[in-house]
Amino acid sequence: MNANVNNIKHKKVLIVGLGKSGIAAAQAMLRLSAQVSIQDSKKEEQVDGQLLTFLRGKGVTCYFDRIPHDMGQFDMLILSPGVSPALPFIAEAKAAGAEIVGELEIAYRIGQGQYAAITGTNGKTTTTTLVGEIFQAAKRKTYVVGNIGVAVISASLDAEEDAWLVTETSSFQLETTRYFKPAVSAILNLTPDHLNRHHTMEAYGAAKAKIFANQREDGYLIINYDDKACYALARDCKAKVVPFSRKEELPFGAFVKDGQIVMKTEKGDIIEICGAEELHIIGSHNLENALAAAAISYYAGIDPAVIGETIRNFGGVSHRLEYCGEVDGIKYYNDSKGTNVDAAVTAIRAIQKNILLIAGGDAKGQQFDAFVKSFDGSVKKLILMGRDGPLIQEAAERAGFTDVVTAKDMDACVRIAAQMAEPGDTVLLSPACASWDMYDNFEQRGEHFKHCVQGLDR
C-alpha cells in the first residue's frame, strides 16, 4: 500500500456523483479512515436502499438532490467522470482551499502497481481489452480497469507492486489528474467529441495530453502517426514517443510491412507480430487498435510471440461492431458504443456496403454533415430515433439523402429495418450519439438492440 494513504486519514472528503466510480471511491475512502460525504443530483428515493443503508451505517453524510451549504468544510472533492469541475459549487470549494481530483488520480496516489493507460476519442475499449488479454496471456498480474467499466480505485488498493493496471482513460478522468504517471501511455486518435464539456478541440486535446504530462525519459508514449492532430500532442512529451501507422512504413515504431504487423526498434531491427489479415476484428480502425496494442505490450516488455498469438485470437468487445447474427440473409451488427460521429463513420466504413443504419440519441452538441457525407453509397436507408434524430435528418436533407425513416424506439427501428432489408444487407446500430436521452448507458442500448434482433428469429 502506498505511503500516500496516510494523507487521506481523517480528511473531510466529498464524493461528487454516486455512479460506479463514486461508490468505489467512497468505499476506498472509508477504508482509509477519511470522513466521507456524498453529493448526487438524484433524489434519495432513486438511490438503491441497500447502498443507502451501507453508507449511513458507515457514518457517511449524504446530500441527495442538494448541495452542501458550506463547501469550505471539505479538504478534498473527488469528482465522478461525468461531473464538470466548472460547476459553481465545485469552484466554491476550490476557492476555499479544497483539492479537486478524480477517482483515477486518487487511485494512482493510494495504490501500487504500474499503469498502461490508454486514451483517444475512439477505440479505447477495444484496445484496452486487447492489451489486458495480452498481459494476462503473458502471466502478468493484470487488472483491466477505468472507463471500461471497473473503477480504478476498486483495484488499486489491492494491487501489488508488480501488478499492471491496464486502464482506459477518458478526457473527463484525465482533466482532474495531477500526479498520475503511467509507465506506458497511449493516445489512439483525436476527433471532435465532448465539446459540450470541453468547448474547444484545443481544450479537449489538452485534457487527453495529460496522460503523459508526468512521464519522463523512462516512460513510453504510443501515439497515432496517421492522425496529425493527435500526433501533434506529442511535441511536449518527455517520454519516448513510439508512433504507430497503418498507412506508412516508419523508421521506428509499429506499422504494417508486407502484410505483417511489425515493430521496428531504434536499432533498426524488424520484429514480426502477426499478419494483418489474421485479425478477427473488422475495419481499418481495428488494425490501428491492434498496432497500438502491440506497441503498448512490446514496450511493457512482453514477448512478441505472446502478443501475436493473443491478437490472432482476439474476437473484439461487446457493443463495438459486435456481430449479432443473421436472420433471413440479413446480418445485424451492434455498434452502440458508436456515441459520436467519428465512431459511427468508422463503423460504416468497416462494413462498406448495403447498410440499413439505425442512428440518433443525445447529440452532445455535434454537427452531422460529415456523418451523412460518409454514407457515400454505403448506406441504403437511415432509420432515426431519439431526441436529436431530427438534427441528423436535417443534415441528410441538406445532403440530398432522402431514404430516411423515423421511429419511436428501438423495437420499431429493428422491425422497420427487418422489413426494408433484403438478403445480403446489413442492419447496423451505430447511433453517432450518446444514449442518455433514452437509456442509462450505451450498454443498455446495445443489449436492447440485441434483444430486438433475437426477437426477429422467433
Image (cartoon, grey):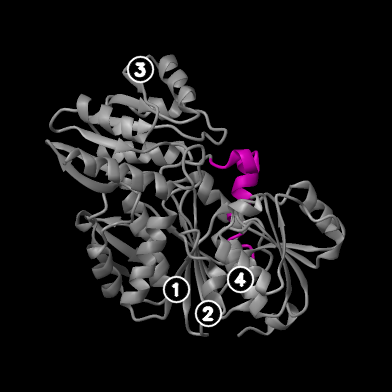
Say left or right for 10 vs 306: right
Q: Amino acid at mark 1?
A: Tyr
Residue 45: image location, x then y, percent: 61, 52
Q: Out of 95 and 115, give the one closest to the viewer.
A: 95
Tell me the quadrant of the picture where the C terminus can be found. top left
Is tag 3's residue or tag 2's residue first in the polypeptide sequence?
Answer: 2
> Pointer 2 and pointer 1: residues touching (CB < 8 Å)?
yes
**Which residue is tagged 4?**
54
- According to the picture, the residue beneath numbered tag 2 turns out to be 113
Disc 3 residue type (three-letter): Phe
232, above or below 199, in the image: below
State whether residue 247 appears in this view.
Answer: no
> Which sits earlier in the primary sequence, circle 2 or circle 1?
2
- Of the two numbered discs 4 and 2 on the same chain, state the one appearing first in sequence: 4
- Residue type at mark 2 is Gly
State the separation of the CA atoms marked 3 and 4: 54 Å
Residue 196 location, quadrant? top right
Residue to which mark 3 is pinned: 401
